[in-house]
Image (spheres, coloured by chain):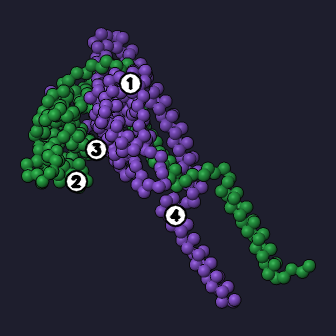
Chain colours: A green, B purple
Amino acid sequence: MKLTSLQKTVFALTILLGILSAMQFRAVNSGYKYMSIKEMYANSIELESQKAELVQLREKANSLKVKIDEFDTARTDNRIDYESVLQLEIENTQKAAGLTTVEGPGIVIIVTDGTRELYENENPNVVIVHDLDIRAMVDDLRNAGAEAISINGQRVIFNKSKIQCTGPTIKINDQVFAVPFVIKAIGDRKYLESAINAPGSYSESLRKWGVFVEVNTSINVLIPAYDGTMANQYVIQ
Amino acid sequence: MKTDKIWIGIASIILGIFIAFQMKFIQGTYLNGSTPTQKTTEILNEMAAVKAEKEALIEEVENLEKQLEDIQGSASEESAIVKNLTDELNKFKAFSGRTKVAGQGILVTIDNPPTDGSYGLELNIAYDYKLILELLNELNSAGSEAIAINEQRVINSTEVRLAGSQMNVNTIPVSPPFVIKAIGNSKTMDGALNLRFGIIESLREKGYYVEVKTVENIEVPAFNGTLKFKYANTIK
């Protein structure tokens, strides 16, 4: 049997195809795990998060090393008073816990119910300040790097401060307040101001609904210490 | 007959060009130029390396903390004043969330619903981060004493924030499922969350998967970041 030239070409091409697909198969299958693009995306977010934690931990390890050094020298060196080092550390921790009165540059926000006329059948709730509005604004401020926040003279700290709706009033740190709400925050004035004024911020939607929001920057804002209870019932160290 | 073959040939060439374009485009936009298999191994290898480093660092931090405690402990044995001061320091440290704590509490797991091809819009809990904020506030109202989201301790400066398509807590990006741990009276917290028309119900109504479990003993990690005050000054 004699092969025609067409049959020869097809034969050669088939062999080539076989070799190529075998190569492809090996490349794909050699110990690689298959992952869909979506899964890959989720994994890369996870990676990002792990890396951020790594940075955080490294920083903590470094600050611990510095602290160990400090305490060690304070203990061994007679010229340094160990008690005063300890006292300083206590003050810093108190500050971080929100237990000291602080002052610094910051902003003062005034939030109060809107005074505009309602449209027909409009729900009056849209022009009234709610507990969740205040919470969202506090979150916006924290995100902008606020170092201390107070609402109507009550220091906002996380584990003990709750901002709750109690009918016509809002309860902050177990004390009842009505409008207007004066929120003070210490931090970078520009960042804090833009956190409240920027398009897309929560306050922007508040303003659109008709709630009155005013922001003023100040060179010196005074924020009182948290003076509520510190007792824990359920936590075991 | 012959013109037919020519046309088929031209059509094949065009098809080939399109396929090549398509592949290039996908690689360029989603994978930054590498093939899917390369990228996959890259990600997985890097993940393993990062995780190993994290473990080592956690251990190092624990060792360092112990060292510091030893120094402070041995110092407080020498005088009563120092001992009192050290106790005070530890109290404030615990209050500001810098110690690992344990106790009875609840465990809330929130996850996106499984993706269904028939829906055009995908639900992502990160976009509804205000509901997470509300959940935290409800937990605070119910008397929780320590809270953590995906091992990030919630402290005074903690923000819960949408960043891109993920959520940031303590500036660390976290991705669902969100595991929220809270220490406090587990019955009160469970009841407050599962209130009719409460927060859990509104989360479920939106389509998220939520599970609340009361736990006998739950561990909440310490805050791992470092707090720096640049603007606020203490006044006496």
Tag 1, which secondary structure?
A: strand
Q: Residues within 10 Å of mark 4 (few under 14, many from 20)?
A: some
Tag 4, which secondary structure?
A: helix
Q: Which residue is mark 1?
A: B105
> Which dot marks residue B26?
4
Mark 4 and mark 1: span between their CA atoms?
Answer: 47 Å
Q: Residues within 10 Å of mark 1 (few under 14, many from 20)?
A: many
Where residue A74 sits: x, y (%)? 33, 22
Mark 2 and mark 4: span between their CA atoms?
Answer: 35 Å
Where residue A89 sits: x, y (%)? 29, 25
Mark 3 and mark 4: span between their CA atoms?
Answer: 35 Å
On the rendered structure, is B11 left or right of A128?
right
Amino acid type shown at disc 2: Ala
Using the rendered image, report if marks 2 and 3 lie on a common chain: yes
On the rendered structure, is B31 left or right of A115?
right
Q: Chain of mark 1?
A: B
Q: Residues within 10 Å of mark 2 (few under 14, many from 20)?
A: few
Q: Residues within 10 Å of mark 3 (few under 14, many from 20)?
A: many
Residue nearest the viewer, comparing A210 with A88 = A210
Which of the 4 image quadrants contains residue B144?
A: top left
- Who's the residue at 44% across and 45% down the image? B113
Q: Which residue is mark 2?
A: A198
Amino acid type shown at disc 1: Gly
Q: Are marks 4 and 1 in contact (CB under 8 Å)?
A: no
Tag 2, which secondary structure?
A: loop
When the figure is inspected, residue B3 is found, relative to residue B38, above or below; the finding is below
